[in-house]
Image: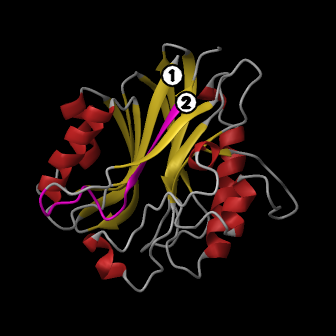
């Protein structure tokens, strides 16, 4: 069995957000996504219905939402949408949380046709100088995911806006290329698995929505789908990866980020 995973930073209520949400819903349906990780999801009572719930309803999916930081009279957080039932969900507050910038991990157990699968999404600190914070957050995530007992006997899938390029130490740690605090780990980077050495940019100057944050380096790959170690029977093999949700309709872009899609083997081959 193969499954399509998509990650996208939804950009909250910025820009023409209702038109953007319509565009995202249509494109996720066209992509045949099975599981979607979302970041910068907004929910403001009386003004904005939970954006993940809205997308899930349009797609006929289940959803889970984890609030991170209060925003505009409501909350901003991360979410997961799933074609399959959600059997359990957990929220982990990550290191370096402050009231104005709390980062969380959302973990769910999905009852897929291939069995229970653990899927996780997160959104890390964004400043160029936040590398140490992101490193601590990813170390905590790696520990937590390894202990996530609801994840079944399949490689875990971690999706999100990690706000770091592939050559940053915090990403190299995930890839088993360097140590953090004397420990190592290993995840497959879905894009790199299928497109070694290719840029796969997701935060791009050509997207006009990035202009308000133009003081951050643009033309970087900072959105990821990571898969645990492939098993001997083929479970967890990355079969394809693409940058998606990267074109406008008229003058409306889906988000200020581009999305990533990965086709992953869940059942044994």
Q: Which mark is residue 2?
A: 1
Task: Say which residue appears at 24% left-offset and 26% top-offset.
Answer: 60
Task: Tell me: 82 left or right of 106.
Answer: left
Q: Give 99 or 14, whichever is nearer the viewer.
A: 14
Residue 167: image location, x then y, percent:
67, 67
Task: Say which residue appears at 72% left-offset and 48% top-offset.
Answer: 143
Q: Are marks 2 and 1 in contact (CB under 8 Å)?
A: yes
Crowding at dot 2, Cα within 10 Å, few <14 / some 14-19 / many 20+, comes out as many
Residue range (magenta)? 250-263
Q: Secondary structure at mark 2?
A: strand
Render colour scheme: secondary structure
Task: Tell me: 106 left or right of 29.
Answer: right
Residue 31: image location, x then y, percent:
32, 34
| Vertical placement of residue 212 versus 75, above or below | below
Determine if the magenta segment contains residue 91. Answer: no
Task: Say which residue appears at 21% left-offset and 63% top-offset.
Answer: 13
Q: Give 149 or 139, whichever is nearer the viewer.
A: 139
Q: Earlier in the sequence, mark 2 or mark 1?
A: 1
Give the residue pinned by disc 2: 264
Determine if the magenta segment contains residue 253. Answer: yes
Residue 154: image location, x then y, percent:
65, 25
Task: Say which residue appears at 47% left-offset and 62% top-offset.
Answer: 201
| Vertical placement of residue 136 versus 127, above or below | above
Q: Give 15 or 49, whichever is nearer the viewer.
A: 15
What quarter of the picture does the C terminus occupy?
Answer: top right
Residue 106: image location, x then y, percent:
49, 45
């Amino acid at each position: 069995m193969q499954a399509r995973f998509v990650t996208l930073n939804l950009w909250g209520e910025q820009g023409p957000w209702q038109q953007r949400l319509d565009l995202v819903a249509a494109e996720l349906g066209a992509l045949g996504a099975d599981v979607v990780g979302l970041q910068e999801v907004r929910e403001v009572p009386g003004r904005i219905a939970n954006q993940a719930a809205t997308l899930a309803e349009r797609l006929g999916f289940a959803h889970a939402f984890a609030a991170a930081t209060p925003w505009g009279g409501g909350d901003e957080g991360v979410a997961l949408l799933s074609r399959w039932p959600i059997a359990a969900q957990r929220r982990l507050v990550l290191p370096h949380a402050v009231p104005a910038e709390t980062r969380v991990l959302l973990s769910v157990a999905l009852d897929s046709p291939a069995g229970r699968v653990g899927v996780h999404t997160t959104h890390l600190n964004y400043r160029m100088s936040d590398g140490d914070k992101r490193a601590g957050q990813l170390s905590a995530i790696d520990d937590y995911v390894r202990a996530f007992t609801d994840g079944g006997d399949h490689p875990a899938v971690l999706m999100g806006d990690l706000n770091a390029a592939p050559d940053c130490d915090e990403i190299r740690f995930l890839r088993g290329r360097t140590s953090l605090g004397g420990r190592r780990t290993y995840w497959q980077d879905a894009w790199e698995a299928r497109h070694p050495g290719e840029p796969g940019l997701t935060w791009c100057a050509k997207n006009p929505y990035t202009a308000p944050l133009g003081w951050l380096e643009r033309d970087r790959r900072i959105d990821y789908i990571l898969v645990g170690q492939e098993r001997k029977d083929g479970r967890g093999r990355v079969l394809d990866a693409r940058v998606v949700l990267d074109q406008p309709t008229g003058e409306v872009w889906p988000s200020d980020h581009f999305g990533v899609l990965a086709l992953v083997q869940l059942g044994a081959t």
